Image: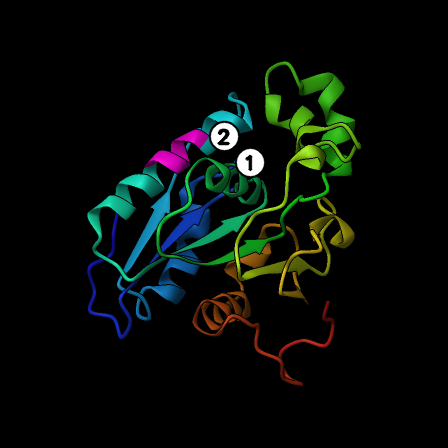
Amino acid sequence: MINRKVPHRADLVVLVHGLAAHRLMMHSLKQSLQCAFAGIVNWGYPSLFSPIEAHGQALAELLEQLDAKGEHDRIHLVTHSMGSIIGRVALNHYMPRQFGRFVMIAPPNRGSHVARHLAPYLGRICPPLVQLADEEASFVCSLPPPTVNELGIIAAKTDFLVLEPSTRLGCECDHIVLPGHHSSLLWRRETGEQVRHFLENGRFKRAENTLRAAG
């Protein structure tokens, strides 16, 4: 659902949650961003039982629909965990004409060791676990990097699901590590402030009282 509050910039932000989650997980981020941007789409999808490609195609179709309306100057993408991989797949299918900036939060860009351990037991009923394994031949590790100009990545300092090195791609223009766990990162005020700062400036905010660990 698109927020219709009056903003000070005519951009749209699309939020995408992760595996075994719900769009309510992104509600705090939505609240942090809704006063700064013309629209917020908090996209939800059934994450457990379909492969990542299916979700990526569905998100690509949404992006194309939003782009066709031509109601916003730019379309930004903010994703959490597996949602970041879905975002990468979606942009490979369809790149909005006026795509803005892409912020990934705790993304398993180089896979997850937890997914690798769970895949032999739960992979048949939850295909994404196999795809997210931190193995060289896995889906996520074989996926080409996103072709976006401004990509920012936020890692959680205490993340037992996605280790900090696994969040990196090498093509990001900024990378930071914030206090928090894999999911609790979404509810921290600082995370919302950093996401907003990157969407507005193309860089994360660097200050002594915000974070010390940087890329």
- In the rendering, at what x and y percent does residue 147 appear? 55, 49
Percent position (x, y) of residue 192?
48, 66
State the separation of the CA atoms marked 1 and 2: 5 Å
Q: Residue at x 35, y 51 (%)?
A: 97
Within 10 Å of disc 2 (Cα), the crowding (few <14, some 14-19, many 20+) is: many
Stretch in magenta: 57-61
Q: Earlier in the sequence, mark 1 or mark 2?
A: 1
The residue beneath circle 1 is 19
The residue identified by callout 2 is: 47
Nearest to the observer: residue 89 or residue 103 = 89
Q: Main secondary structure of the magenta part?
A: helix
x, y (%) of residue 38?
26, 63
The answer to whether 1 appears left or right of 108 in the picture is: left
CB atoms of marks 1 and 2 within 8 Å? yes
Q: Is residue 138 left or right of residue 5?
A: right
Q: Amino acid at mark 1?
A: Leu
Q: Residue furthest bottom?
A: 208
Look at 80% across and 32% down and name the residue there: 136
The residue positioned farthest toward the top in the image shown:
124
Q: Quadrant of residue 155?
A: bottom right
Looking at the rendered structure, the secondary structure element under dot 2 is loop
